[in-house]
Image: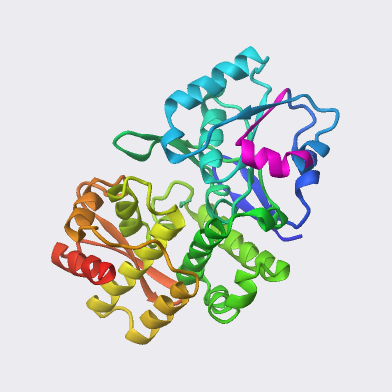
Amino acid sequence: MPTYSVTTPQRNYSAVVERGLLPRAGSYVPSKAGKLFIVTTADVWERHGLALASGLEGRAYEVLFFPGGEERKRLAEVEMLAEEMVRLGGDRSSLVIAFGGGIVNDLGGFLAAIFMRGIPVLQIPTTLLSQVDAGVGGKTGVNLVTGKNLVGSFHQPLAALIDPDVLTTLPEREYRAGLYEVIKCGIIRSADLFTILAERHADVLSRDPDVVEEIISESVRIKAEVVSADEREGGLRRILNFGHTFGHALEAETGYARFLHGEAVAFGMRAAVRLAEMRGTLTAREGAKIADTISLYGPIPPLDAISAKNLVARMAADKKTLQGRVHFVLPVRIGEVEVVSGIDEDDVLAAARATLA
Ligand code: GLY
């Protein structure tokens, strides 16, 4: 069972990747914990609730349903869930189990971070995207009208429990969207992972259990390593944002309605490749390998009627922009990226235009 240590000033914990782990999740709940609050969505609970509940026998728990959707990942929902927790007997000994995709991991983690000034959370991500990203690393938060994840906190979990078996019921589009985050991990830090995605795409797409476990494990290993080196994104952790500068702009420009997050990241990675090629810091050969591999897992929804100018304007408003400087994570070669700022806006515009064309 691959287990990766996440070592941060706030907490040291394990990110465990294991098929069939879900029914054993209860063994990661401390014996002294009070009432457990499982934050989840109706569809996840319907598919996987029994498996989780079977391992919680003898423990007092309540299931709190969150409607799901980026538009509901708001402070008002956190407040309602906190009120419900109090009504149901929650106190400072309680524990939140965030059981679902990235939105539930973010919102459930944030609820735990602020409930009675902070209680522990166990992260159990159930989509590929959340298993390789949101469920590990302690970023929690909610959206404001003015932008995504603009209120939040770093709240590291007691453990991140990743059961690849739950992906067998994941809708095809969501699975593919998650694969783009896996491709991202390969490009930023693991040429071997990238090779699996480039050469074994039929096994990846058919969800061969061994291959799925391997690509998740390698992605989680990378995430654990990066977060351990830089919990608060002062330096190295920025590389996890590869594809996100253009990607976030695309999501915002289309009202978070047209693209899944992973699909927007796929667009963003292609745009970053274009930009790196234009700057002469990535060879056309490496760039083509990346673009071809991204295409193997597509297509993403159509890119028509999107203004490159608007995308560039949106980047300036992103929370990753510091003191007006937009940072880009650009590939140097497969397995290595660099963080660059101060790029001429005309070059960014040209890369966006070329990727939209
Ligand atoms: N999702 C990027 C990070 O965890 O830093």
Indicate yes or no whether the magenta region holds residue 44.
Answer: yes
Residue 295, placed above or below residue 109: below
Give me the residue at 73% from left, 23% from top: 34
Total number of numbered labels?
Answer: 0
Give me the residue at 55% from left, 20% from top: 82
Relative horizontal placement of residue 52, taking residue 4 as reference (left or right): right
Relative horizontal placement of residue 121, taking residue 146 as reference (left or right): right
Give coordinates of residue 300: x percent, y percent. Answer: 41, 64
Tell me which colouring the rendered structure shows: rainbow
Extreme-bottom residue of the structure: 285
Give coordinates of residue 207: x percent, y percent. Answer: 66, 67
Q: Which of 58 and 113 is in front in this view?
A: 58
Q: Nearer the viewer, residue 296 or 321?
A: 296
| The N terminus sits in image quarter | bottom right
Residue 126, placed above or below residue 215: above
* Residue 307 occupies quadrant: bottom left
Give coordinates of residue 28: x percent, y percent. Answer: 75, 41
Residue 189 seen in render: yes
Indicate yes or no whether the magenta region holds residue 1.
Answer: no
Relative horizontal placement of residue 186, taking residue 7 as reference (left or right): left
| The C terminus sits in image quarter | bottom left
Residue 92, placed above or below residue 206: above
Residue 55 seen in render: no
Give me the residue at 60% from left, 36% from top: 41
Give me the residue at 53% from left, 48% from top: 134
Q: What segment is highlighted magenta in the picture?
A: 35-50
Give coordinates of residue 27: x percent, y percent. Answer: 80, 40
